[in-house]
Amino acid sequence: MAEDIRKETGEPREEVEAMEGAEKVVNEEAGATENPEEAGEPDSQKSVDEAASEREGPKVEEVTEESNEDNAESEEEEEKPEEAAAVQSAAPAPTLPEERIQAAKEKVAEANREIQSYIDKARKEFHQFEEYEKAELQPVLEESREILLKVGIEEELPVVEGKASLPELELENPEEERLEIPAVSSGKGGAFFWALLGGIATLAGWYAFAAERAGLPLIPKHLPQMPQLEKLSAAIADLFGQGTHAPVGAAIVIGSTLVVMWIIYITLIAVRRSHNQRLAEEVEAQASEYCKSLDECKAKMESVEELVQTLDGTARKYEVVLKEMNAGINRALYIEEVSDFDELHEKTKERIEHLKTLLEEIEKVLETPIARSGELTPESVEVLREAKRMINDEILRLYS
């Protein structure tokens, strides 16, 4: 068949031979029948399709494997935070009294740092408003006062000379004290000291008993030497029916002394641990209550901060409106060429009345303490609400 194709198409012999070899490979692998038409398509087409599938097959597998690896890596990255959170949540809670008290101390310290940050933030907002009030608002208010003085209505003005600074912002209640967690001891040092005293007392008791039994003086003139010690040990051994074996007596004395010291030590440790357990429960309750009170304090600081922000926005509205009113009244005074209030034009009088009302209102706001003893003052809320209403009405009047 390949030879026929070569004759019909005139293709080179090498290509025809290659096609002939491909036909043999396809027939051998696929087990083709003698009638190639029954297979549904020509053998040459089969060989081309199979060759193409063999070339494309590994690529698809490689892509699939790469995509699986990428998915596996992404799943591992997603699982990492969950595993970290699981490990953190699985951290054992403190059980020893000392650890519980230390945890309560850290909790209180963290709460103190957090509430201090709230206080600092509120103070920062207030200091920024103070700087604005001194640098930008007060010059406008002074100009408004001068206008009112110029037209002769100074007797109804608020404080004109010696303008005091803004009232102090009291964000902390002087009657409230920060919770101090007492230091706690394991009691091991004290227990060892008393155990040592108990051991010394036990040795002294054995010495007194053995000296009386051995016929030696209770209070020796010199330190007992080895013969005296052996005699004392032998007397103690004989008391327990062990003959006069000095090593046995010495072992009894040393062993009983160590037992007494151990009993004293573990007893005092147990008493201290029981005391620390009760103390830990009390400290945890106090810390929990203290943190709740600090949560309330945080809400108060947030309300103070919000009020200061509202005050800042309201004062800036007053500044803009008063600045515009000052310019308009100065222009009217210059054009009308009069300085007496009764001789002014009716519209100018109306503007001056509005100016006087707004000036009195903003002065009242600035003189009212915002916070006292760590709490927002009700009068500051009420005064600021009225000031906002008044300046908003004035702005609506300007645009009506």
Image (cartoon, rainbow, N blue to C red):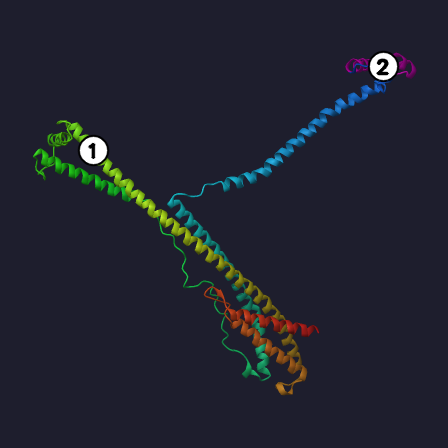
Q: Tell me: residue 140, above or below residue 24.
A: below
Magenta-colored segment: predominant secondary structure:
helix
Is residue 18 one of those drawn in magenta?
Answer: yes
* Left or right relative to 312: residue 347: right
The residue shown at (78%, 21%) is: 50
Q: Quadrant of residue 176?
A: bottom left
What is the number of the mark on residue 254?
Answer: 1
Looking at marks 1 and 2 on the same chain, the residue that comes earlier in the sequence is marked by 2
Question: Which of the pair 366/247 is nearer the observer?
Answer: 247
* Structural crowding at the residue carrying mark 2, measured as other residues with C-alpha within 10 Å and reported as few (<14), some (14–19) or many (≥20): some
Q: Position of residue 183 (x, y in %)?
A: 35, 50
Question: Which of the pair 295/383 is nearer the observer?
Answer: 295
The residue shown at (71%, 24%) is: 58
Q: Is residue 116 visible in the rendered structure shown here? A: no
Instruction: Tell me where the magenta segment starts and ends, as one range.
Output: 1-29
Q: Position of residue 115 (x, y in %)?
A: 48, 56
Assign a secondary structure to mark 2. Answer: helix
What is the number of the mark on residue 16?
Answer: 2
Q: Residue furthest bottom?
A: 343
Q: Quadrant of residue 387?
A: bottom right
In the rendered structure, which amino acid carries the disc numbered 2? Val
Cα separation, mark 1 vs mark 2, equals 110 Å
